[in-house]
Amino acid sequence: MRGQIALITGATRGIGLAIAQALATEGCDLILTGRGPSALARIRRELSRGQRRILAEPCDVRDPGSVETLFRATRKQFGRLDILINNAGIAHPHLPIDQLPFALWRDVMATNLDGMFLITQAALPVMKRGGTIVNNLSIAATRVFAGSAAYNASKHGALGFTNTLREELRPKGVRVIGLLPGATDTDIWKTLWPQAPRPKMMSPKTVAEAVVYAITLASHATVETLEILPTSGTL
C-alpha cells in the first residue's frame, strides 16, 4: 500500500483515527479531516514520521462548500485518491420518537447520510480503477435499537446508498465495502449509552486491522459487507 493516497473523514478519534494509524503503518499517504483543527494538527504530528505525506484539512461533511474546499486541497497536493474511508458520524441521546427533537434528527441525518453522499460524490472524479471506498455503517444499518431512531434511520439509509454505489462502481473497478462494526470502545457511547459495559467491546484497532485486510485483498476479490462483532455477543 506504500504510496497510495487515503482520505479518512472523522479521523481524529475512535475508528477513524485507528484506521488512519493502520494505513500510515502500511505506508499510505493520508488526507485527514474532521471538524477540530487542533485535533487534526495533533494527529498530523503523530503520524508524520517517515516519508509519508499528510494533508490535515478541517471539513464539515454536512456543508457542500466545506467539502469542495477539502477536495480542492486534495487535488492540489495529490491529484488523485486511492482509498476513501467515510467514517464521520454522530449519535444522539437515547430518546423515543415522540420526544426526539426534529433539529436533532436533522443533524444526525445531515452528518451520517448527507455527509457520506457529499464526500463520495466529490471523491469519485479523482478515484481510478483499483480504488476502494469503505463506508462505516455500524450494525445499526441492519438492526434496530429502540431510542435511536435518527441513528438507525441514518445508518439504514447509508446501507442503501452503499449498496447502490457498489453496483454503480463495479464496471469502473472501484470496490465498495460496507463496514458494520458492533460495539466498539469509542466516544460515541458517551451519547448513545454512557453506562455501556466498555470491557465487553472491541477496540478501534481491531476494527482497523479488519479494514486493512479487506482493502488489501487481491484485485479480483472483494469483501462487500464486513460485519465485526465482540466475541461476548450482545452487551
Image (tube, grey):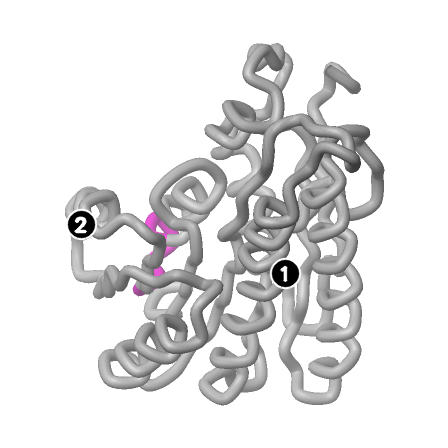
> Does 142 sit left or right of 63 as displayed?
right
Residue sitting at x 45%, y 85%: 126
For label 2, count other residues whose C-alpha is less than 10 Å away and answer few (under 14), some (14-19) or many (20+): some
Q: Is residue 151 above or below residue 93?
A: below
Magenta stretch: includes residue 26: yes
When the figure is inspected, residue 181 is found, relative to residue 2, above or below; the finding is: above
The residue at which mark 2 appears reads as 41
Image coords of residue 196 (percent x, y): 61, 14
- Residue shown at the point (64%, 41%) measured from the top left: 101
Viewer can see residue 61 = yes
Instruction: Work out whether 97 lies above or below 76.
Output: above
- Amino acid type at mark 2: Ala
Q: Quick one: quadrant of the C terminus?
A: top right
Q: Name the residue carrying label 1.
A: 113
Between 90 and 163, the one nearer to me in the picture: 90
Numbered range of the magenta stretch: 24-29
Q: CA distance from mark 1 to mark 2?
A: 26 Å
Q: Is residue 43 left or right of residue 143?
A: left
